[in-house]
Image: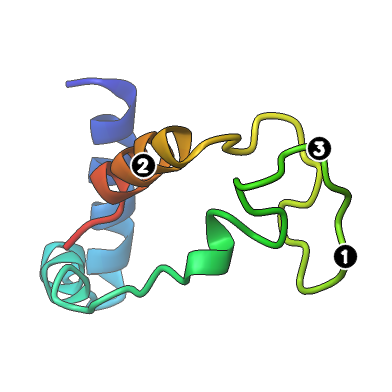
Amino acid sequence: MNNIEQAYALARDRYALLGVDADQALARLAEVPISLHCWQGDDVGGFEDPGRGLSGGIMATGNYPGKARTAGELRQDLDMAFGLIPG
């Protein structure tokens, strides 16, 4: 059993003392759809003119180092996110 599994087992046991079935709660949570808005990937910069400065909008990623610079990188980021989001 790895560290994450051990930590979950401990948490599951603690929640059980409070009458909470953690396994059932996670199974129910896995059925809840999660939306991923387009601005969370591309934000306000776009890919057409990577040298252009930001011009407003939400700027969640803005000029953050490591943000996707191309549509291909955005797809890789999405693949990673979808692999980590349950359901």
Q: Amino acid at mark 1?
A: Ser
Q: Name the quadrant containing residue 29.
A: bottom left
Q: Amino acid at mark 3?
A: Gly
Q: Residue at x 13, y 76 (%)?
A: 31
Task: Give the crowd class for mark 2: few <14, some 14-19, many >=20 residues within 10 Å.
Answer: few
SS for callout 3: loop
Q: Quadrant of the N terminus?
A: top left
* Pointer 3 or 2: first along the chain: 3
* Pointer 1 or 2: first along the chain: 1
Task: Give the crowd class for mark 3: few <14, some 14-19, many >=20 residues within 10 Å.
Answer: few
Q: Could you say where residue 83 lies in the image, as x and y percent from the top left?
A: 25, 43
C-alpha gap between disc 3 and disc 2: 20 Å
Q: Amino acid at mark 2?
A: Arg
Say whether residue 5 is left or right of residue 54.
left
C-alpha gap between disc 1 and disc 3: 12 Å
Give the residue at mark 2. Answer: 75
Whether residues under marks 1 and 3 lie with C-beta atoms below 8 angstroms apart, the answer is no
Q: Compare residues 86 and 72 and report the one nearer the observer.
A: 72
Give the residue at mark 1. Answer: 55
* Residue at the front extreme of this rendering: 48
Give the residue at mark 3. Answer: 51
Q: Could you say where residue 19 lies in the image, as x and y percent from the top left?
A: 22, 78
Q: Is residue 29 above or below residue 60?
A: below
Q: Is residue 1 above or below residue 54?
A: above
C-alpha gap between disc 1 and disc 2: 24 Å
Q: Compare residues 73 and 78 and report the one nearer the observer.
A: 73
Q: Compare residues 2 and 83 and report the one nearer the observer.
A: 83
Say whether residue 54 is left or right of residue 86.
right
SS for callout 1: loop
Q: Name the quadrant containing residue 59.
A: bottom right
Q: Could you say where residue 6 lies in the image, as x and y percent from the top left?
A: 27, 31
